[in-house]
Image (cartoon, grey):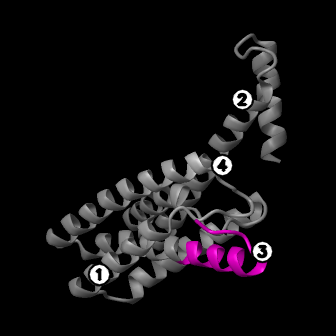
Amino acid sequence: MLEKLSISIVRKMVTGGVVPSGDEKLYAYGIQQSLVLLINTFSVVILGILTGMLPEAILFYLAYAGLRTYAGGYHAEGPIRCYIYSMALIAAVLFLINAVTLTAPVLICVALASSFLIVRLAPVESKNKPLSDPERAHHKSIVRNIVAIELITAAFLAALGFAVFAACIVLAFISVLLLMLKERYSFDHNNNHRIH
């Protein structure tokens, strides 16, 4: 559906002289990815409003999406499954944030352990998203930077007394790590694929 809409938009852009002919696939892909991002962001905002946890939903989504993009891990087959799994994950995280109170020592231990493992394992390729050697090196470098920034942000939030917001970042670490482990385990054992 989004692919057809993207192609239709690009055709109109080519006809209007906005986009050069011959680059339609590239522009259609860019528009499709932009629409996916827009839909996901809108859905996160709606979920946050419905649960009364808008700041938590947005913070988790930002921490999760930024890290997940480069750390890799399990990718659902097809955009609809991806969307459903992503929204279910965010709903589960919001439930956990509301239901469980994490103390500062627990947050620190979990943050350090999960971030260490993420940096150690990243990037984890998916059968749906293979990486070249230069891409792996680039992704690993970006993951280190994102983890450092998010750890500092979580520590700063916790120090200011915003443990709930620090928990959002820590739960993003845990979520990314679990998806990395799921894909690494299934890729390694089911496909006998070399993991880097």
**Magenta segment boundaries in residue numbering:** 178-196
Q: Main secondary structure of the magenta part?
A: helix
Between label 3 and label 4, give the one nearer the viewer: 3
Give whichever of discs 3 and 4 has the lower sequence position: 4
Mark pair 1, 3: CA separation = 35 Å
The amino acid type, in three-letter code, at marker 3 is Asn
Residue 167 occupies quadrant: bottom left
Q: Give the labeled residue for mark 4.
A: 36
Between label 1 and label 3, give the one nearer the viewer: 3
Give whichever of discs 4 and 2 has the lower sequence position: 2
Give whichever of discs 4 and 1 has the lower sequence position: 4
The amino acid type, in three-letter code, at marker 1 is Leu
Q: Give the labeled residue for mark 1.
A: 107
The amino acid type, in three-letter code, at marker 2 is Tyr
Mark pair 2, 1: CA separation = 42 Å
Mark 2 vs 1: CB contact within 8 A: no
Q: Give the labeled residue for mark 3.
A: 191
Q: State the quadrant of the C terminus.
A: bottom right
* Residue 27 circle label: 2
> Which residue is painted at 76% across and 22% down in the image?
23
Mark pair 4, 1: CA separation = 32 Å
> What SS does tag 2 mark?
helix
Tell me if residue 149 comes above or below residue 196 in the rendering: above
> What SS does tag 1 mark?
helix
Q: Is residue 83 left or right of residue 173?
A: right
Give whichever of discs 2 and 3 has the lower sequence position: 2
> Which residue is painted at 42% across and 66% down in the image?
119
> Which residue is painted at 28% across and 87% down in the image?
106
Between label 4 and label 2, give the one nearer the viewer: 2
Q: Position of residue 77 (x, y in %)?
A: 78, 64
